[in-house]
Amino acid sequence: MSTHIASVYDEDLKYLTRRISEMGGLAEQMVAESVRALVNSDLALAQKVISDDAILDDAERQIGEKAIVTIARRQPMAADLREIMGSIRIAADLERVGDLGKNNAKRVIAVATASLPRQLARGLEHLAELALVQLKEVLDVYASRSVEKANSIRERDSEIDAIYTSLFRELLTYMMEDPRNITPCTHLLFCAKNIERIGDHATNIAETIYYMATGAQPVGERPKDDTANTVGAIGT
């Protein structure tokens, strides 16, 4: 590979890295703002989140198109091919994170009509904080390519699952205590699940980074502590 071709190829890889970082920053912002809009019944902020999703979608398309052109022109092998394919996978996860933030923002109107108990608001904020920390840390790992840190993030996914299950139980309790709580709490259940899924996407990104750096998949099943599907079952 000539110096000129190598230089152009490096620029292609730098472009993918830069765009992934930009997507990550916007996805983080959308999630944080969607939760703030929910807690504060801020309809204007919710609309901003919904509008920002189009920017994230466009960024994913640009990354995919650039990756395909780069593969076609450079025919990369081994680590370089993993780098490009990893960018496509991470962009897809970040686009989905944005979708989940947008979905929560769309529920702001429905939740705003009811008074959100402070305890539930704190629970939702705490869940979002954990998911956002995980998302921020995994984007830092994308920059550093630390295999150890990628594996550590993967191992911590169960923390978010446990908080989600606890919040799920609280919401069910409010619904059983007063039928008027059923509609807003149902919306909040969906919101909480969306936030829990954001943690899953952060874990997906950690696994992709591990693969990009090592060429192997992480060993063993990822830890899970989501028992919401058993709530209300006999013996629980």
Image (spheres, helix red, strand yellow):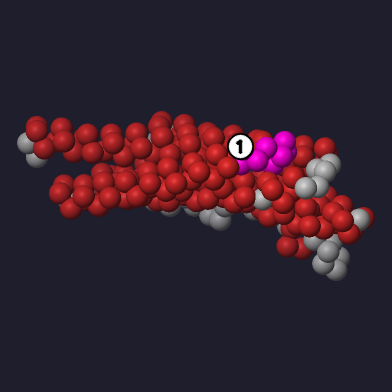
**Position of the C terminus by quadrant:** bottom right
Name the side, left or right, on which 189 lies relative to 13.
Answer: right
Q: Looking at the image, which residue is at 92% across and 55% down?
A: 177
Magenta span: helix, strand or loop, mainly? helix
Name the side, left or right, on which 143 lies relative to 158.
Answer: left
Residue 175 picture location, percent across and down:
85, 56
Residue 88 picture location, percent across and down:
36, 49
Range shown magenta = 38-46
Q: Most extreme residue toward the left, as rendered?
A: 2
Q: Most extreme residue toward the right, as rendered?
A: 177
Q: Most extreme residue toward the bottom, as rendered?
A: 234
Q: Say which quarter of the image contains residue 142.
A: top left
Q: Looking at the image, which residue is at 78% across and 53% down?
A: 185
**Position of the N terminus by quadrant:** top left
- Magenta-span inclusion, residue 7: no
Q: Looking at the image, which residue is at 31% across and 39% down?
A: 16
Return the residue at label 1: 45
Q: Say which quarter of the image contains residue 23.
A: top left
Any part of residue 65 in sight: yes
Residue 10 picture location, percent across and down:
21, 35
The amino acid beneath tag 1 is Leu
